[in-house]
Amino acid sequence: MLEAFRTRRPWAAAIVSFIFSPFIGMLYLGRGRLAFLYLLAGIATAVLFLVAVDGHITPDLSGSVGALSQLPLSIIGAIHAWFIARRRLSGEIQYWYARWLALVALVLVFPAIALLIRTFLYQPFDLPSVSMSPSLNKGDFFFASKSAYREADPKRGDVVVFHWEGRDYVKRIVGLPGDRIQMVNDRLAINGATVPQHRIADFIEQCGEPAPCRVPQYLETLPGGRTDKILDRMPDGALDNTPLFVVPKDNYFVLGDNRDNSDDSREDLGYIPRATLLGRAATKFVANGRLVWQAVE
């Protein structure tokens, strides 16, 4: 059996391509250009899968369903590898990347690189709720910078990802350690000063009605000059008047940009310890069901 894999028999080539991906299968057969094309096809399939599900799959199932999305490409690659191996000549040049040592290294190195990037540099997240509209909408996917706060402190206005009580959240920091935060008559006040805001064009969203819904939208300028868009659905919402909050040391006060539809520091979440921050939301790559490349603001 081992001899069949060494000599690139058709059934052996199909097995390698199906189990380890068509990318590895084509390298195994010495077809570098085809391997590169299959690699691109695999990435495109994964991204199109994210666009297609658009938040309709629970996080617990997304990994297994995502793996199944690669199954058609694996089957096609296995069949393709079988036909190539049938036509392959025994005297063909064996490129360095077709040797077993190189293939084993690639199989091990690619996941290791992906794990290192995810752990220390950038991790993809999706937004399952409307709490951060209009900056991040339900179903959007984005990369969070895992290194953003390794050498620097979070800034007021940063959109952060944090893990709290078993869940990942995405919110905007409005209060730094020592700040006094309060909602007064539908307006955010920081250290006794009402944060300036002015009305801009309404935010248009799909709300299940025949016609799109219009939501009042404002530009809010935080201390330091950071300006962000927020939504105010109800002029007299339940969280438009709050007690005074004094942010403890090494903690932050966060709000959702969709102010009347967000569970944040005003209620259950409370103050967010710095130790729970996973990173800063940096770049959207799927927005409103479309592939994009936009900075998260």
Image: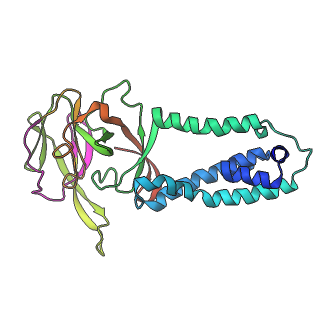
Residue 97 visible? The answer is yes
The residue depicted at 87 percent of the width and 52 percent of the height is 88
Residue 21 visible? The answer is no
Quarter of the image holding residue 149? top left
The residue depicted at 74 percent of the width and 60 percent of the height is 79
Callout count: 0
**Prevailing secondary structure class for the magenta stretch in the rendered image:** loop
Give yes or no for residue 238 being in the magenta stretch: yes
User: In screen coordinates, is 173 left or right of 290?
Assistant: left
User: In screen coordinates, is 56 left or right of 92?
Assistant: left
The residue depicted at 27 percent of the width and 38 percent of the height is 157
Q: How far from the left and from the top, in percent, is residue 93?
A: 87, 41
Q: How far from the left and from the top, in percent, is residue 220?
A: 21, 45
Give yes or no for residue 93 being in the magenta stretch: no
- Return the residue nearer the eye: 189 or 264: 264
- Return the residue nearer the eye: 235 or 70: 70
* Magenta residues, start to end: 220-245
Q: How far from the left and from the top, in percent, is residue 147?
A: 41, 30
